[in-house]
Structure formats: C-alpha cells, structure tokens
Amino acid sequence: MNHYLSQVAFRPQHREDHKLAHQLLSMPYLQHQKIWELFQRPPGSEQPFLYRQSEADELPRFLVLSDEPPKTHDPRWQIQTKAFRPNLHIGQVLSFSARLNPTRSLRRPGEKRGKRQDLVMAALHEVASEKRGVERQRLVNCELPLWLSTRGEQAGFAMVEDEDRLRCAVTRYEVLRFKTTASPEAHSVTLGCADFVGQLRVTDPDRFAQTLHQGIGHGRSFGLGLMLIKRPH
C-alpha cells in the first residue's frame, strides 16, 4: 500500500478565519475534525491518517501521514504531499522524533483486561506529594525512554545504546486536558503527551514499516502516535 507524508497548513484569508486558526492551535478535537475533512471516506471508516501539530509556526500547521493524499478545494488549506517509501533494512540506524501517549495497563483480580493509565500520572499518585517533583523528573527522564524501548521489541526496532544508556530523551512532557466537542456536555479527555527524540536501529523492516504507518500507543485522534524518521547526520 502506498503512503504519503504531507505538510498541511491553514492560512486565514478573512478576519473571521483568525478565530478558527486560534482554535486549531489549542483544540485537538477540532484539529482531528478538520484533517478528517481532507479525506473522502464514508461514515464509520477507520481513521486513514496520523498527524502531529508543528510547533514551528504561529499559524496551524500539521504533518500528516496517510494512505491517500489529502485534498481540498478550500483555498485556506495549503497542502504539500510526497510519497512516503522509506528504504528500511536490518541494522539501519535512524534518528527519530515522536509525540506519544505513554500508558501502562493495570489489571485487577477478576478482570480480563487491564485498565489503561497514563504512566507518569498514575505513578505520581502513588508518591507522597512532597516527593512528586523529583519523582516526575525521574519518570520523564528514565522511565519514559524505557517504555518506548520496550514497545520497540514488538514494533520492529531497538533503541541505540551508549554504555548501557539509551540514546533517547524526552524533551517535553505535559498533560493535555480538553473537551471532545465544543458542547458544554462534551466528554472531557486527559492525556499525557511526551515528545521523544533519539536514535533507533531497525530489527524487522516490515514490522517497523507497519509501526510507522499505524502509529505507536494511543491518542491518535488527538495528534499523538506519529513517529518521524530520518538518516542521522
């Protein structure tokens, strides 16, 4: 299956467009809705894309990985698309960045499936309040890279290590809180969001390609899960 990587930018043309631009910068549910509109899919279809908001612009800009090129007749949306066909092979070292929702599963006695929890928030609830600042730093700097490394075992990659230290860092961790729609009765969502950077080694090219296309972890409807790769300098 072909895949495509697109730069998608919203450029206001009239005064009222600036309100929408401001909302798109801070409302993940609206980002998801507007990007969905760039794909011609019948109701009930699976989401055909992953996306990530860019921090490099004061106006809304997104990277979108999809199985068909996004299209629109709306002149406010500027789209640049190229084919995404990474040439992957075993042992290949790649630099990566990813915005992910690190979670853990807690299964209580008698439950068939564990309850998904944000890794950092759940762990901090188990620590005395006066120790949470130090523990938060340890979780972000140590546990989150280990979490991603463990995910790699089933995702076709292994984290590069230097003297038993993972070549992976979390540059930002924050908790996102937002409504799923603009309605006052809308469901509230709380998601931990971590930005990872580092280097990995491809262990299974086919499986890793699938990982890139399907995303990692949860929160894909809210701009999480997309891993970007490039050759290291």
Image: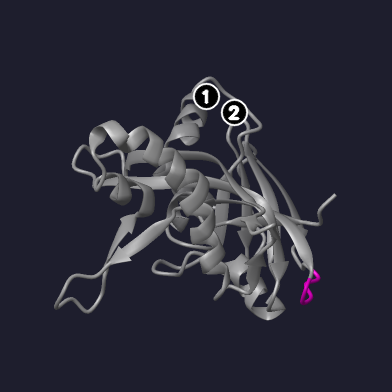
Horizontal side of residue 117 vs 14, given as left or right:
left
Looking at the image, can residue 184 be seen? yes
Element carrying mark 1 = helix
Where 12 sits versus 123, above or below?
Answer: above
Residue under the image location 18 percent in, 70 percent down: 108
Quarter assignment of residue 50: bottom right
Q: What amino acid type is highlighted by mark number 1?
A: His
Q: Quadrant of the N terminus?
A: bottom right
Q: Residue furthest left?
A: 110
Residue under the image location 39 percent in, 69 percent down: 44
Element carrying mark 2 = loop
Picture coordinates of residue 211 (x, y %)? Answer: 59, 70
Q: Residue furthest front?
A: 163
Looking at the image, can residue 72 be seen? no
Where 167 sits versus 11, above or below?
Answer: below
Q: Are the two marked residues, 2 and 1, in contact with CB atoms closer than 8 angstroms?
A: yes
Picture coordinates of residue 40 (x, y %)? Answer: 54, 62
Specify few, some or many for label 1: CA neighbours under 10 Å numbering under 14, 14-19, or 20 or more: some
Q: CA distance from mark 2 to mark 1?
A: 6 Å
Q: Residue furthest top?
A: 15
- Residue occupied by mark 1: 18
Where 79 sits versus 203, above or below?
Answer: above
Picture coordinates of residue 105 (x, y %)? Answer: 32, 65
**Mark 2 vs 1, N-terminal side:** 2
Magenta region = 87-91
Residue situated in front as seen by the camera: 89 or 132: 132
Q: What amino acid type is highlighted by mark number 2?
A: Pro
Residue under the image location 21 percent in, 37 percent down: 184
- Residue occupied by mark 2: 12
Q: Is residue 88 magenta?
A: yes
